[in-house]
Amino acid sequence: MSSNRKATLNYGDGKSIDFPVLGGTIGPDVVDIRTLYGKTGMFTYDPGFLSTASCQSTITYIDGDEGVLLYRGYPIEQLAEKCDFLDVAYLLMRGELPSTAEKKELDYVITHHTMVHEQLNRFFSGFRRDAHPMAVLVGVVGALSAFYHDSTDINNPEHRKISQHRLIAKLPTIVAMCYKYSIGQPFIYPRNDLSYTANFMRMMFGTPTEEYIVNPVLVRALDRIFILHADHEQNASTSTVRVAGSSGANPFACIAAGIACLWGPAHGGANEACLNMLEGIGDVSKIGEFIRQVKDKNSGVKLMGFGHRVYKNYDPRAKLMRETCHEVLGELGLGDDRLFKLSMELEKIALSDDYFVSRKLYPNVDFYSGIVQRALGIPVSMFTCIFALARTVGWIAQWNEMIGDPDQKISRPRQLYTGATQRTVPPMGMR
């Protein structure tokens, strides 16, 4: 990473200062400006951190121009085809894909941590029945630190490992409980003879009155959704987890912070917004008028599920999600599904229209994942909870990497102050 290259900043009256240029294994170089304030008395101004690297990381790499997504160097396409979610979880956490023995051990550990403390079940009764599942999820995950004191010492490697396993194992149980609570059905306890994703689907859709029948095609589809959403570099929620973790907060609190950030419609709520958009269009015959409104800046109509802050090419996750869409709808006999046909036509028009092509507004993963989840029977209100379940693995990997980074300091962004200068408080009668 070290380099003899320099970047020179010219400022003031003929002043200049050199900064090291650092190079990663792939991707853009960065200018190391850590000494900028100390040497010049100035900060950089970068709203949204669009040109700022906040950390070093070895976990995920994105090339938005080429449409590339790598987990620890492995293309997302290969992982989605050849691995299951816990393979990917091990990869993100440990840096390499597991051997047969390592995978067997991880499966056993995660499977035997899926139960939650029985008192936590009663915690749900404090929420209103009509509370949004994400509101419940934030509260319950944050409360985990009150139940598992034996894994909150972030300086203890064994504590960190236990808390990671607990979070990965218990999120499916808690997410399913959020759903069951919202619809007034009894909680379904996990079973140790099912896979991670099959167990989750049973807890979501099973009832005490009859045995839930596992459909391997649907399980694989949801498992692929988990893989595609497992990590995505330094996005808003991941950055939130790192910022919270930089203060020394326990991992349960940090993940709860990430969930809260993910809830935003510009982040984890995008697939819900996309499905609502398709419902709003309603029919293929109305796409032309919808496209016209999207192009009209004064209409306020937005094209959801297209474009991405990072990807300026076709989102590689969208291609995989599109294939999964076909598999699920075919398995369920929903090949004539109205929203899927509508999405196909909308994609076809948008990809051939110069207005969208010139702006590089390609379909992203949210464009299809909402349709798949809807076909699986997952309600719109649960979409972001599913996202949080999957992304917890990435958050944990990023949090653990941050804890071990010798350059890590408590996050403290600076500002460009534009408010009032110092003034005197006037007496009450003169205000």
Image: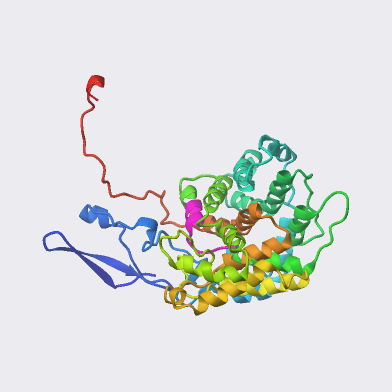
Q: Name above or below for residue 398 compared with residue 179.
A: below
Foreground pick, 136 / 51 = 136
Q: Is residue 237 magenta?
A: yes
Can residue 75 be seen from the camera position used here?
no
Q: Residue at x 65, y 65 (%)?
A: 371
Work out which quarter of the rendered image holds the N terminus and state it.
bottom left
Residue 363 image position (x, y, % from top left): 54, 71
Residue 37 image position (x, y, % from top left): 26, 53
Q: Is residue 388 magenta?
A: no
- Identity of the residue furthest to the top in this view: 429
Foreground pick, 33 / 299 = 299
Q: Which residues are magenta?
A: 230-242
Q: Residue at x 48, y 65 (%)?
A: 293
Can residue 204 be seen from the camera position used here?
yes
Q: Name above or below for residue 36 compared with residue 364.
A: above
Residue 166 image position (x, y, % from top left): 66, 51
Work out which quarter of the rendered image holds the C terminus and state it.
top left
Determine the image quadrant of residue 128: top right
Count the marks: 0
Foreground pick, 191 / 363 = 363
Residue 382 image position (x, y, % from top left): 65, 53
- Identity of the residue furthest to the right in this view: 210
